[in-house]
Amino acid sequence: MRIGFGFDVHQLVEGRDFILGGIKIPSEKGILGHSDADVLLHAISDAILGALALGDIGVHFPDTSESNKGMDSKIILQKCISLAKEKGYVIGNIDTTIVCEKPKVMPHALAMRTCIAAICEKTIEDISIKATTNEKMGFIGRGEGIVAYATVLMVKESAN
């Protein structure tokens, strides 16, 4: 078994979609980034890559590449899972935390868990999503950004 930790942060701005956990959530502000800026899927992807010492998503999907511009982060996650499979690993479980003031994301947790589980070929019981605010402190508290953390357990495929 191997454990990976992922982190991602993006700005919140007007005029962008709020894509989180692979789904679009209604919001006054959206998430700014080179891809669709799904911080949750980025954190999970980084955790997978980190568990297997494969670098991070910036190595595999640089924000300087035009081919990655506007990329659906579900594709990023799928490619990271494929890289893990090439190394003989599959996901055991995923635990995540989202930090933002608004929109409230927990009403969408089941939809996000369902989307992530389908990509990862797991059940929703293997995907945990938690959310909290930053108690109105800092850039998150001012509604300027969003953060996601992820921990992933990777298991040798033969042991699964």
Image (cartoon, helix red, strand yellow):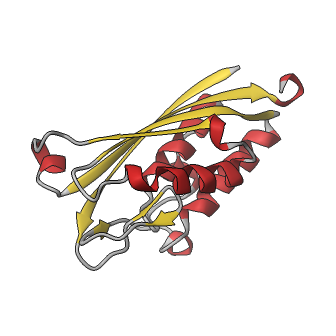
Which residue corresponds to the image point at 58% horizontal and 35% vertical from the top-left? 94
Left or right: 123, with 29 as reference point = right
Number of numbered discs on residues: 0
Comparing 35 with 60, the one in front is 35
Left or right: 40, with 45 as reference point = left
In this rendering, the answer to whether 118 lies above or below 16 is: above
In this view, the residue farthest toward the bottom is 15
Left or right: 21, with 48 as reference point = left
Give the image quarter of residue 75.
bottom right
Residue 88 locus on image (x, y percent): 82, 33
Instruction: State the quadrant of the N terminus.
Output: top right
Instruction: State the quadrant of the C terminus.
Output: top right
Residue 129 locus on image (x, y percent): 47, 41
Comparing 138 with 28, the one in front is 28
In this view, the residue farthest toward the right is 158
Comparing 63 with 138, the one in front is 138
In this view, the residue farthest toward the front is 107
Left or right: 96, with 102 as reference point = right
Which residue corresponds to the image point at 50% horizontal and 69% vertical from the top-left? 65
Residue 31 locus on image (x, y percent): 33, 65
In this rendering, the answer to whether 75 lies above or below 118 is: below
Comparing 40 with 102, the one in front is 102
Residue 60 locus on image (x, y percent): 58, 53
Which residue corresponds to the image point at 44% horizontal and 63% vertical from the top-left? 63
Which residue corresponds to the image point at 54% horizontal and 36% vertical from the top-left? 47
